[in-house]
Amino acid sequence: MNKPWYEAVNVDEYDSPALFIYPDRIKYNIATLLEKGKAVDFRPHVKTNKIAEVCEMMLVAGIKKFKAATIAEAEMLAMIKAPDVLLAYPVTIPKIKRLIRLIEKYPDTRFSCLIDHAEGVKSISDLFTDANLKAAVYMDLNLGMNRTGILPENAIALYQKMKSLPAIQLMGLHSYDGHIRDREVEERRKKVEQAFAPVLVLKRELEKFEGRPMILIAGGTPTGLIHAAEGDRESSPGTFIFWDKGYADLLPEQNFEWAAVVICRVISIPAPDMICVDLGHKSVAAENPQPRVFFLNAPGAVPVSQSEEHLVLKVQDATTFKPGDVLYGIPLHICPTVALYEKAYLVENNRVNGYWKIIARNREITI
């Protein structure tokens, strides 16, 4: 009898909680993404996986451009010789200095960063001028998420101010529309078209000023495939690589497979209808309301309470469990869950056969 895809026959050799990842499923997810567009249409965000070997799998598949949220993630990509890396996060002076050191240490990688404020772009120009370098930048646009970025109607004024700065090269526009999360794909598509109408106008204006094409980087997981279908921009999904319960429920049209699982064990049976497992706040992303994890081999388990190292689950009959039983869970949100672990164990053919370090969970690698 075949075992479920997620089970590992040698799981008792590994303590819990732990993160298991499934390379065959990761390959499937990369291939599925590339069925939706050409490799040049994508600039995946690596904040989800933070693992050099996973990013190498994307490189092998033909994906050459990436987004990163931290200097460590950007350095991880440079270490595997990724050709093009955008630091998609506002850079203050310490980060600008670290970015310069990255550029100096890894000349084979083209690094870029975001701008959305005159003072910020001046700081970039001043420090890059001192280093005798030119900064490749993308203007970050606020399309309604109200997190970072400049409103499109104010972008030309910022462009005119940055034109006088000596160390700035404008590459194009960056726009993250993470607030567009409708479950119905057609409703999502309509909102994307509405939000991006002023962006496309701005892009044409800047191309007239610059006399050359402007790159447009757009979207995240909910809207990424919509953007990729346009063929005139780079789409930036990230979660597709591992997938999670949250997006599986929200985006039913995206047929990616779960490729990352948290394992935990029953550690106590405190009541006839309750079990306690070793999956606390420190082991699975805790920013969302419960349930924060869906158990593949205990789908009826309902969370009652969670603390730092404990998760209490209500079950129909606790006598069907015993201490040491392994539960395999799909996190609601995989990205911050991955960051809680130092390594991910590889499961192939129902057996753990090694691990990959989650190297970019650290704030620093060498820089």
Image (cartoon, rainbow, N blue to C red):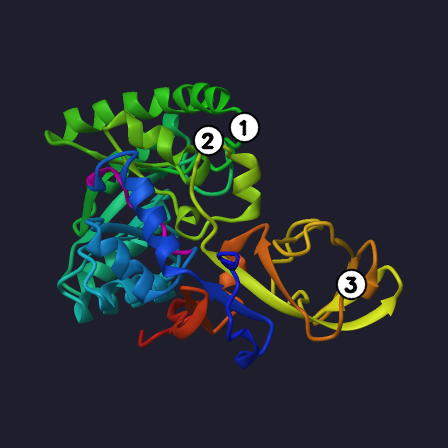
User: Which amino acid, mark 3?
Assistant: Thr
SS at badge 2: loop
Looking at the image, which residue sits at the far right? Answer: 272
Numbered mark located on residue 182 in the image? 1
State whether residue 215 is above or below residue 297: above
**Residue at image coords 47%, 25%:** 185
Instruction: From the image, tell me which residue sits under label 2.
Output: 253
Label 1 vs label 2: CA separation? 12 Å
Residues drawn in magenta: 40-47
Q: How crowded is the residue under tag 3: few (<14 C-alpha within 10 Å), some, or many (20+)? A: few
User: Which amino acid, mark 2?
Assistant: Glu
Viewer-side residue, 294 vs 309? 294
State whether residue 170 is above or below residue 333: above
Measured as percent of width and height from the top left, residue 321 is found at: 76, 66
User: Which amino acid, mark 1?
Assistant: Asp
State whether residue 108 is above or below residue 216: below
SS at badge 3: helix
Numbered mark located on residue 320 in the image? 3
Which of the two marks, 1 or 2, is nearer to us in this view? 2
